[in-house]
Image: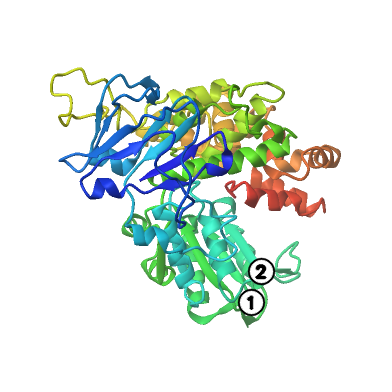
Amino acid sequence: MLTILYHPCLDRIGDRALLPELDAGGAAPLSRVEPAFAPPGRSGGEPLADEHLSRKPLRLLPAVDGGVRLELGDSSTVVVVHGKRLQSDAHVSAAQLRRGVVLELGHRVVLLLHASASRQDLITGTSVPGEERELIGDSDGLRQLLWEVRSVADIELPVLIRGETGSGKELVAHAIHQAGPRRGRPFVAINFSAIAPTLASAELFGTERASFSGAVQRKGYFEQAHGGTLFLDEIGDAPLDLQIALLRVLETGEVQRTGAQVRKVDARVIAATDADLEAKVASGMFRAPLLNRLSAYELSVPPLRERRDDIGRLLIRFFREELDRVGEMHRLAPPAPEDKPWLPASLVARLAEYDWPGNIRQLRNVVRQLVIGSRGRDRLEVTPAVERLLAAPSSAGAELPEDDSPARHAARSLTRPEPAAPAPPSGQIASAPASATHAASHPTRRSTADITEDELADALHASRWNRAEAAKRLGITRPSIYVLIDRYPRFRAAQDLTLEELTRCHRECEGDLGRMVERLEVSEEALARRVRDLGLGQGAVLARRDTDMPRRE
């Protein structure tokens, strides 16, 4: 199959061309006039029809090892793979085909050559009504996920969502909520890594006035979600004593505010984690009965590198949103045939080849960086931060070198050597500082006395002022990060911000919490609470969900 990752006519992005000729042992042509590309699930379609591509076709042929051989033939179309122009025929292995090979054609069109499910599977729709706007894509992995979402949505069971950081677990939880009978009722999300262990019970179950010194009457998250859905993110970080209380609620449907009577509550629980809960059970950090209860049904969110054909769809969605934010939507207007597009095909190819350890959140951050760094410019500029990211080694599989051997059509290994170290598992566009890499490979705790002010600044910036994540990067405990922040006056907490500063920033950022975090350089979760407590409106909280930012302290 071929999927369009980029085309000067942006509406063509995501269109596909099935290649049944390869399955039948024949050759599939690729040129300006063939094959026909159509949106997933539709028949017919149109050719690429870009005049910078030759009418004389390239040819794709099946190889004996299950891969594909690419023959240039008499075509004058320029084919670029991994930044290098192909000068002769090349071979794509079966493993590379499963990963997906990015082909840049004529410096104008980017295609992904990849293996996919059967034709019938692709034609059969599996989307959840109303959720396509949030769960963007049409890859096999996402289709399977949407099918499972639809299947479990109306069954009153707890669901455990597993997936890497930034892969969209909260969006999946919201999709389950919207597809089920509880749509229209509250959807309440809580992130355990953002709650102090001493406050977790009060946050979940609520408090009664005067139940302890300074206590006020307040509903907990379970009661707030009554009739709807409670989403427990980062469930692996829940304190052990709270896990017992959670298990009791799941078994009895009863909660008890601090200082009050037991009361019934009706909230469907969906939990999510990127942690190895089985390993936590083995080490005594997570209770097996709670894991068994939460995992009545499990969903797995595929990482972005396993749904590479969705990258073009996600890219154009994010570019449209970010350009609209800065008032430059005209950048994406169709260029004249003789003009170069504002978004270069070569950059799209590089983005599609990257493995995205931070997944969709990282991709969105990169698009925002590109848009802001190119404001007012005639051409899109790749900022130094993005350049560093894309220059980092990845597990990109198939490099297609020139074939100048006599055995021109023989199968040959095109796999890149494995990198010395994997790309840092960060959701940010900047590569992790040296200290973070050291901490990841050496679990021994560091002393706060060894950490400089600049090193702390790098870690906070790379983790978007998520203190728990910054502590992990630095190889220190979470309490130690607060000691360091208090040591250096340049760092602030959300509670240190004045009302005037918060109000002005909220107005200038139009309530977008992500932009406010970048400007004020404080914790997202704490900033959201300040905004809510000061009555500045719900815009920032909604913006957080739209940008799929981490909900952490």
> What kind of residue is marked 1?
Gly
Viewer-nearest residue: 341 or 195: 341
SS assignment at label 2: loop
Task: Point out residue 302 in the picture as x, y percentages from the top left corner.
Answer: 41, 51
**Is 424 located above or below residue 468 in the figure?**
above
Q: Residue at x 47, y 24 (%)?
A: 107
Task: Point out residue 301 in the picture as x, y percentages from the top left corner.
Answer: 43, 55
Picture disc at residue 419 = none
Q: Residue at x 42, y 29 (%)?
A: 104
Splitting the image into 4 quarters, where does residue 331 fall? top right
Residue of label 2: 186
Task: Point out residue 326 in the picture as x, y percentages from the top left corner.
Answer: 73, 34
Left or right of 95: which side holds 259? right
> What kind of residue is marked 2?
Pro
Residue of label 1: 227
Splitting the image into 4 quarters, where does residue 71 fall? top left
Q: Which of the marked residues, 1 or 2, is nearer the chain's N terminus?
A: 2
Q: Is residue 337 visible?
A: yes
Q: Tell me, what colour scheme is on the image?
A: rainbow
Viewer-nearest residue: 89 or 544: 89
Task: Point out residue 515 in the picture as x, y percentages from the top left corner.
Answer: 70, 38
- Answer yes or no: do the residues labelled 1 and 2 have beta carbons within 8 Å? yes
**Is 33 located above or below residue 165 in the figure?**
above
Number of residues whose C-alpha sits closer than 10 Å to that of mark 1, classed few (under 14), some (14–19) or many (20 or more): some
SS assignment at label 1: loop
Q: CA distance from mark 1 to mark 2?
A: 7 Å
